[in-house]
Image (cartoon, rainbow, N blue to C red):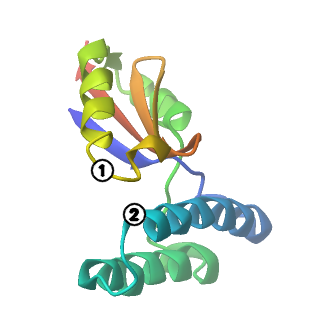
């Protein structure tokens, strides 16, 4: 199974922790969008008005069962999948090199960061992880 996940803890019961994590995560995300897309780009408007707006509102304003977005970092997924007898498969170093090559084709590509966290690939912006990519299998 291939999994990609936001690399942030938006699942805390504590509003303050959730708010702080969302503020940090989305400030980096908006920095990435600002540097990567023109202000009048229709795709940017959709991204900001739909995905980001609803994501922020759900994480910050919704509680209990009303909250739909419950992102957690890769170490939480490792523990969760491990309980069900799943193990993380190693991604090849060529996947890391390929990601770096693709990023360099874009004007803001030098701000994209990639590094391995165990067997997972973390993608980020200026050193701050934004998402993880991992591969899992049953023993």
From what the image shows, is residue 36 above or below residue 132? Answer: below
Q: Is residue 49 left or right of residue 59?
A: left
Disc 1 element: loop
Find disc 1 in the rendering and name its residue.
106
Q: Which element type, helix, strand or loop, lies under badge 2?
A: helix
Residue 137 lies left or right of residue 11; in this view the side is left
Look at the image and tell me in which quarter the C terminus lies. Answer: top left
Give the residue displayed 24% in from the left and 27% down from the top.
Answer: 98
- Packing grade of label 2 (10 A; few <14, some 14-19, many >=20) is some
Which one is in front, 15 or 50?
A: 50
Q: Which numbered tag is attached to residue 36? A: 2
Distance from the alpha carbon under mark 1 to that under mark 2: 8 Å
Q: Earlier in the sequence, mark 1 or mark 2?
A: 2
Place of residue 104 in the rendered image (x, y in percent of width and height, measured from the top left): 32, 39
- The image quarter containing residue 3 is top left
Residue 42: image location, x then y, percent: 25, 85
Which quarter of the figure is the N terminus placed in? top left
């Amino acid at each position: 199974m291939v999994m990609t996940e936001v690399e942030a803890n938006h699942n805390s019961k504590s509003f303050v922790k959730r708010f702080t994590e969302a503020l940090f995560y989305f400030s980096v995300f908006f920095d990435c969008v600002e540097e990567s897309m023109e202000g009048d780009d229709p795709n940017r408007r959709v991204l900001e008005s739909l995905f980001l707006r609803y994501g922020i509102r759900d994480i910050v304003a919704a509680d209990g069962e009303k909250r739909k977005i419950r992102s957690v970092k890769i170490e939480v997924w490792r523990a969760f999948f491990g309980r069900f007898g799943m193990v993380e498969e190693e991604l090849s170093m060529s996947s890391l090199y390929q990601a770096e090559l693709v990023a360099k084709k874009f004007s803001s590509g030098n701000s994209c960061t990639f590094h391995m966290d165990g067997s997972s690939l973390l993608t980020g912006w200026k050193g701050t992880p934004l998402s993880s990519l991992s591969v899992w299998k049953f023993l």
